[in-house]
Image (cartoon, rainbow, N blue to C red):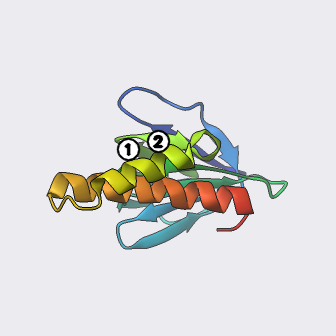
Amino acid sequence: MPVTLKLVTPVKVLPPKQCHQVTFTASDGEIGVRQGHAPLVALVGKGGMVEVIQQDGSRQSWAVRGGVAQVLKDEVNVLVVDAVEAGAIDAAKVQTRIAALEGDTSAKAADELAWLRGQLLVASRAKSGTR
């Protein structure tokens, strides 16, 4: 039986994805979930990612912006502030935004930088095919 990912933001709900494995960035490291995983609830990192590995080994990933993940039975529910599919990330635009924020020491800028750097990491991993 596959694992089902449900990825939800305040403005969109992605169609449920059935897959072999779901990996997400928790606040204290990456968590990989396969069939039969123990139940858990974890905070999702501000510059995190969610990745699914299909039965055929293909991968799909999203940059995610903080939230919470729940693992219950063979379902992974991830509720986040924002999510962007790796292929939709415009790395040049993200790098420009990072450059504009780098001198700002406010907490808001730190959160935004974490989100932007997370997008670059997800896009880079997807492009190179690595984790």
Q: Please, which residue is most extreme toward the left here? A: 106
Image quadrant in which you'd find residue 104: bottom left
Q: Nearer the viewer, residue 22 or 27?
A: 27
Work out whether 59 lies above or below 84. below
Q: Could you classify mark 2 by the number of other residues whose Cα lies within 10 Å: few (under 14), some (14-19), or many (20 or more)?
A: many
Give me the disc on residue 80.
1
Question: Where residue 35 is drawn, which disc sits there?
Answer: none
Question: Cα distance, mark 1 to mark 2?
Answer: 7 Å
Residue type beneath disc 2: Ala
Task: Give the tally of numbered discs.
Answer: 2
Q: Is residue 131 left or right of residue 80?
A: right
Can residue 21 be seen in the rendering of this structure?
no
- Pointer 1: residues within 10 angstroms few (<14), some, or many (20+)? many
Q: Quadrant of the C terminus?
A: bottom right
Q: On the image, numbered disc 2 is attached to which residue? A: 83
- Say which element carries label 1: strand
Give the side of residue 123 with respect to residue 38, left or right. right
- In the image, taking residue 28 as reference, residue 121 lies left or right, namely right
What residue is drawn where x is 35% and y is 67%?
Answer: 27
For the residues labelled 1 and 2, say whether their Cβ atoms are less than 8 Å apart.
yes
Q: Secondary structure at mark 2?
A: strand
